[in-house]
Image (tube, rainbow, N blue to C red):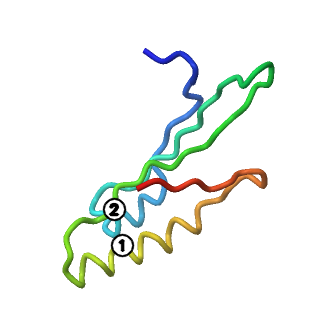
Amino acid sequence: MNKRFAIGRARLVLTDQAFAFGGRPPMEVTLHFTEGQTARTMVVLVVHLKAMSDAASYDRRVTSAKALKTVPRQPSTQASWSR
């Protein structure tokens, strides 16, 4: 088990937009860790977007992407996206 990160908080966000996320709203996780001698905090959004290639599914992904932009961020937070 990796002890580098400690979970400070985990909560579902955008629950009112769950349909756009295929019924799985994003989870915001606050992680605490130490880098060198400096204590740091990182907030991550775990996202599962709607699958399939039909137009309705695509529209739901667009809606969910717009909703993600409304989640408040810390001033020093930088986004990192992975595929």
Q: Residue at x 59, y 32 (%)?
A: 31
Report the front residue among 13 and 3. Answer: 3
Judge from the rendering whether residue 80 lies leftward or rightward of residue 50; answer left or right: right
Report the front residue among 52 and 23. Answer: 52
**Image coords of residue 77 (percent x, y):** 71, 51
Q: Are marks 1 and 2 in contact (CB under 8 Å)?
A: yes
**Image coords of residue 20 (percent x, y):** 34, 69
Q: Residue at x 57, y 23 (%)?
A: 6
Task: Tell me the kind of residue under disc 2.
Answer: Leu
**Image coords of residue 49 (percent x, y):** 33, 62
Residue to which mark 2 is pinned:
49
Quadrant housing residue 22: bottom left
Figure quadrant of the N terminus:
top left
Q: Earlier in the sequence, mark 1 or mark 2?
A: 2
Judge from the rendering whether residue 77 lies leftward or rightward of residue 43; answer left or right: right
Figure quadrant of the C terminus:
bottom left
**Image coords of residue 38 (percent x, y):** 80, 24
Judge from the rendering whether residue 67 lies leftward or rightward of residue 79; answer left or right: left
Residue to which mark 1 is pinned:
61
Task: Tell me the kind of residue under disc 1.
Answer: Arg
Q: Residue at x 57, y 24 (%)?
A: 5
- SS at circle 1: helix
Report the front residue among 18 and 74. Answer: 74
- SS at circle 2: loop
Inter-mark Cα distance, 1 to 2: 6 Å
Judge from the rendering whether residue 36 lies leftward or rightward of residue 18; answer left or right: right
Q: Is residue 10 above or below residue 16?
A: above
Q: Residue at x 55, y 27 (%)?
A: 7
Q: Is residue 34 above or below residue 14?
A: above
Quadrant housing residue 53: bottom left
